[in-house]
Amino acid sequence: MSVEEYLRYDEASPLRHEYVKGEVYAMSGVTLRHNTIARNIIGRLLPAAGNGPCQVFFSDVRLGVADDVYYYPDVMVACGALNDLDVIVRDPCVVVEVTSPTTARVDRSEKLLAYRGIASLRAYLIVDHRRRRVERHWRELTSSWVHDEVVGEGSVPVPCLDVELPLDEIYRGVELPTVAEPDPVDYEA
């Protein structure tokens, strides 16, 4: 399917679809836990954005990662001039994905690589849906990417809005299953 066909198809469909180099992927529904986590993040970021130059968007706004890659992140922050009638954000500052059983692998591999290619992106946060853990990938001033994790307690800094996301707020009202912590993942730079 061409990009033009995808855009027409997705606009007419009651479901959202992501598009990766000619392939179309239907977005599945989310659990209440996933939705609560995303809502908590948005609830923290919206007041920080206020009436400033940055806007906070959630899962219904399409992100153009490349000419042939379009995703629907759970949360994103974009700064600068935006047209209210646009249907695609192209220059986000922050992207947040909340994992699910069906998306965790893609969030940590394919999307990580794709998002790191966005020149305007300063941080990509992967929020775990099963344990209190946020993987933070951010671009240093030297343009190299750095990775760390906040696990259990603490806060995650969010650039562009100059706000912290405390894990207590991210997971407020969320009952998490008891799971063992996995071994840390080693990412290539």
Image: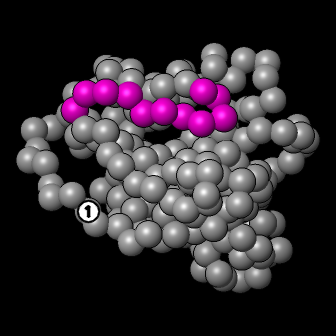
Q: Amino acid at mark 1?
A: Val
Element on which disc 1 rests: loop
Please name the residue shown 72% across and 17% down the image: 50
The spot of residue 65 in percent (x, y) is 68, 64
Q: Is residue 26 left or right of residue 10?
A: left
- Magenta stretch: helix, strand or loop mostly: loop
Image quarter (top left, top right, bottom left or bottom right) of the N terminus: bottom right
Q: Is residue 123 above or below residue 142?
A: above
| Residue 18 can be seen in this image | no
Image quarter of the C terminus: bottom left
Q: Tell me the residue that label 1 is attached to.
A: 185
85 is higher (above) or lower (below) than 13: above
Q: Position of residue 70 (x, y in %)?
A: 67, 65
Comparing 44 with 6, the one in front is 44
Question: Would you call the spot at circle 1 few (<14 residues within 10 Å), some (14-19), or many (20 or more)?
Answer: few
The residue shown at (66%, 35%) is: 160
Residue 64's image quarter? Answer: bottom right
| Residue drawn at the location 42% of the way across and 33% of the way down | 156
Please, is residue 101 above or below residue 34 in the view? below
Residue 10: give x, y in percent of width and height: 71, 62
- Left or right, 15 with respect to 157, comes to right
Q: For residue 116, which quarter of the picture?
A: bottom right
User: Is 131 left or right of 159, judged from the image as shown?
Assistant: left
- Visual colour scheme: one colour
Image: 77 above or below 111? above
Residue 11 lies, in percent from the top left, at 77, 57
Can residue 23 be seen in this snapshot? Answer: yes
**Is residue 166 within the magenta segment?**
no
Q: Is residue 155 magenta?
A: yes
- Stretch of the chain drawn in magenta: 152-162
Q: Residue at x 60, y 27 (%)?
A: 162
